[in-house]
Amino acid sequence: MDREWNDSQPIYRQLRDRVVDMILDGVLKEGDPLPSVRNVAAEYRVNPITVLKGYQELVDEKLVETKRGRGMFINAGARNLLLQGERQKFLAEQWPRIYATIQRLGLTPEELLDAAATSRRSSDPAEKER
């Protein structure tokens, strides 16, 4: 997890978002434990209550469950639940702006696909070695 915090939202919310990103990226998988509140608080120099509040949001969203005496664990289906929500959010919030830009610039589907393929190749380590 990134150690830097920004002023755009509360730290507990940023912590929650980082855990969500880790689930979406496959770093944390179903059944995996979350790092302990105490460890995260010490490592990131934040109040344990702040960490607990971020974790509690994950519990409230049914992404994480608490096992008494053992810790907090990623729930089965958490990634799929997040993907569904993130896809809806993208289509409602980001896609309209992206689509408007595509229209304004007159980009064709072929140009977009070519740009995506080029981008994919440039970020693929195997392609860079060729």
Image (cartoon, helix red, strand yellow):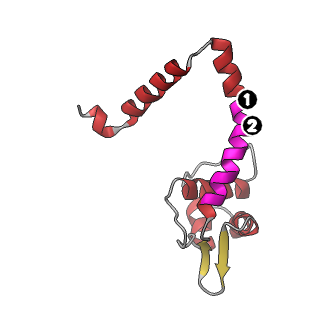
- Position of 121 compared to 74: left or right? left
Image quadrant holding the N terminus, namely: bottom right
**Would you identify the image quadrant in which residue 107 lies?**
top right
Q: Which structural element holds mark 1?
A: helix
Q: Position of residue 41 (x, y in %)?
A: 62, 66
Per the image, the residue denoted by label 1 is: 96
Q: Is disc 2 placed on a helix, strand or loop?
A: helix
Toward which corner of the image does residue 52 lie, by quadrant?
bottom right
Q: Mark 1 belongs to which amino acid?
A: Pro
Residue 30 position in % (x across, y down): 55, 69
- Is 112 magenta? The answer is no
Magenta stretch, residue numbers = 80-96
Decide: marks 2, 1 in contact (CB < 8 A)? yes
Q: Position of residue 109 (x, y in %)?
A: 55, 21
- Residue type pointed to by label 2: Glu
**Residue at mark 2:** 93
Instruction: Tell me the distance, in whole angstroms, between the alpha carbons under discs 2 and 1.
Output: 7 Å
Q: Nearer the viewer, residue 108 or 65?
A: 108
Q: Is residue 85 magenta?
A: yes
In this view, the residue in front, 125 or 4, is: 125
Residue at x 50% of width, y 18% of height: 111
For label 1, count other residues whose C-alpha is less than 10 Å away and answer few (under 14), some (14-19) or many (20+).
few
Q: Which mark is residue 16?
A: none
Residue at left 37%, top 31%?
A: 121
Q: Residue furthest front?
A: 109
Mark 2: give few (<14), some (14-19) or many (20+) Cα within 10 Å.
few
94 relative position to 28: left or right:
right
**Which one is in front, 57 or 114?**
114
* Residue 130, position as x, y percentages in the image: 23, 31
* Residue that appears at 41% across and 26% down: 118
